[in-house]
Amino acid sequence: MTTAASALKAPAAGSWSSRLMFVAAAAGSAVGLGNIWKFPYIVGENGGGAFVLVYLGCLALLGLPILIAEIMIGRRGGDRPSTAFLAAARAAGLSGRWRLVGALGATTSLLVLSFYAVITGWVLLYGFDYAALAIGQGSEVLDSEAHFSRLTGDARAQVFALLIVASAAFAFSARNAAGGVEAIMRWMGPAFAVLLFLLAAYTALAHPAPFDVVRYLLAPDFAALKPAAFGEAVGHAFFTLSIGLCGMVVYGAYLDSNASVPTLALAVATIDTIVSMLCAFIVFGVAFATGADPAQGPGLIFVILPRAFSAMPFGHVVGAAFFAAAFMAAFTSVIALAIIVSRAIEETFGATTRVASAITALATLSGGTVVIGSVSGAAPIRLFGAPLLDALDAITSSVLLPVSGILIAVFAARALAAEIRGLPFGRALLFCLRWVAPLALCGVAASRLL
Ligand code: PFF
């Protein structure tokens, strides 16, 4: 790195206490609503096994190389998104305009945060309901559709939950970045893993035909695959690995320079994939047991699962465990998103971490309240003909994330070419970043037009 570029590297506020902690933190960011809420329902909408195969291909050929690239950009350029790109660009003699990729990632993060925190709030409210039922309080969810409509129609309850989510996230994002994330991952990581395995074991034992669920997830039926599924798989591969938003740039900045980035990235992607598959197994296992249609769309975990929880033995306890696990996964991702936005505010306005985190929390509350206004019908806003929440989800996952992911790939292939070539499978990685990623974007654009 040149002296000028070294001077540009933002002072990273601390580093991970161990490489395992980096893997835990990055997995905490990666595993979230994308695995629990979204993966099962898009698999259901796209016909099961064939979509899973396409998705795994996207993870291997696009997701993993870009994950490695993001971590390397952060390690070289620091934890502030635009500054990191600027430093890496200057060091490689490239245009300073590449810093706009960092700005795009941070702006997209804020958009994601404004609906992601709202859905995290729904999970929290469902968790409260089931915890109450599990200890014999509250009233049974008799009509799960009506229950979900009541919740999404209740703006006050949603704002209350959003307030809890935003202020709790502030408590962790306002601390020295590595420190705050480590503090929460130390206990939430193991607690989440235990709950997930218990739920999977329960599903396997209580389900009359668990292999039917496995077959649905693994046996490909390519006839069920629509062209748009390819774009959905690419967008989701980016979303689930937290790439394209510079989340891994920030976490990569706290990594020591001798760590093997491909090994750590592979560990993160493997954990994320195992969690997605287990979540899909649990969700479809529970749904199939009650004869539900897997292609239910976004209401799958909020409508179909509660119906099943009411019908199964120990359903309230299983429901409480499910929503507790979902909340933990979502909350650690909210923290990661909040940290990206804070770092961008720090670099843009010279704010301290605390002030930047407070501004991020307020922005999340404001954006989230607008989304809640739209969801509840209090102030129904539509964007490109769709309800605001759906539109934000579609624009970020299907457009902004793939575009910034591909820009990151092209940038890394130019700015970090020598370093990447020296890695294990370096040439293959460079090939994926340089050729496969841009071609895939063209494929996605074409599939949208079909
Ligand atoms: N990976 C998260 C999920 O699958 O829910 C979403 C996310 C979190 C994206 C943090 C980006 C990020 F920086």
Image (cartoon, helix red, strand yellow):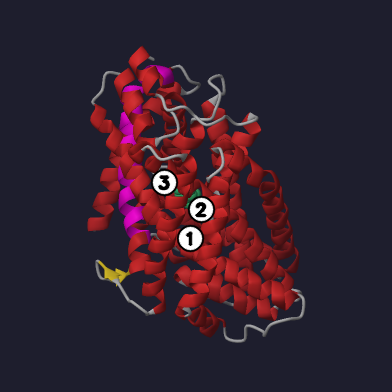
Is residue 414 in view from this perspective?
A: yes
The quarter of the image holding the C terminus is bottom left
Answer above or below: position of 224 versus 403: below
Q: Amino acid at mark 1?
A: Ala
Q: Amino acid at mark 2?
A: Val
Q: Residues within 10 Å of mark 3 (few under 14, many from 20)?
A: many
Give, as a single range, the part of the protein colored magenta.
Answer: 393-419
Q: Residue at x 53, y 46 (%)?
A: 173
Chief secondary structure of the magenta span?
helix
Earlier residue among tags 3 and 2: 2
Task: Residue 158 in the image: state x and y as whole percent.
Answer: 50, 72
In this view of the protein, which residue sits in the foreground, 198 or 223?
Answer: 198
Please give the label number shown on residue 341: 3
Q: Residues within 10 Å of mark 1 (few under 14, many from 20)?
A: many
Please give the label number shown on residue 334: 2
Task: Residue 183 in the image: state x and y as whole percent.
Answer: 65, 43
Residues at circles 1 and 2 in contact by the CB criterion of under 8 Å: yes
Answer above or below: position of 93 versus 448: above
To which quarter of the image does residue 93 belong? top left
Q: Is residue 397 magenta?
A: yes
Whether label 2 lies within 8 Å of ligand 1 gets the answer: yes
Please give the label number shown on residue 117: 1
Q: CA distance from mark 1 to mark 2?
A: 7 Å
Earlier residue among tags 1 and 2: 1
Task: Residue 136 in the image: state x and y as whole percent.
Answer: 76, 80
Q: SS of the residue at dot 1?
A: helix
Q: Residue at x 38, y 30 (%)?
A: 84
Q: Residue at x 35, y 24 (%)?
A: 88
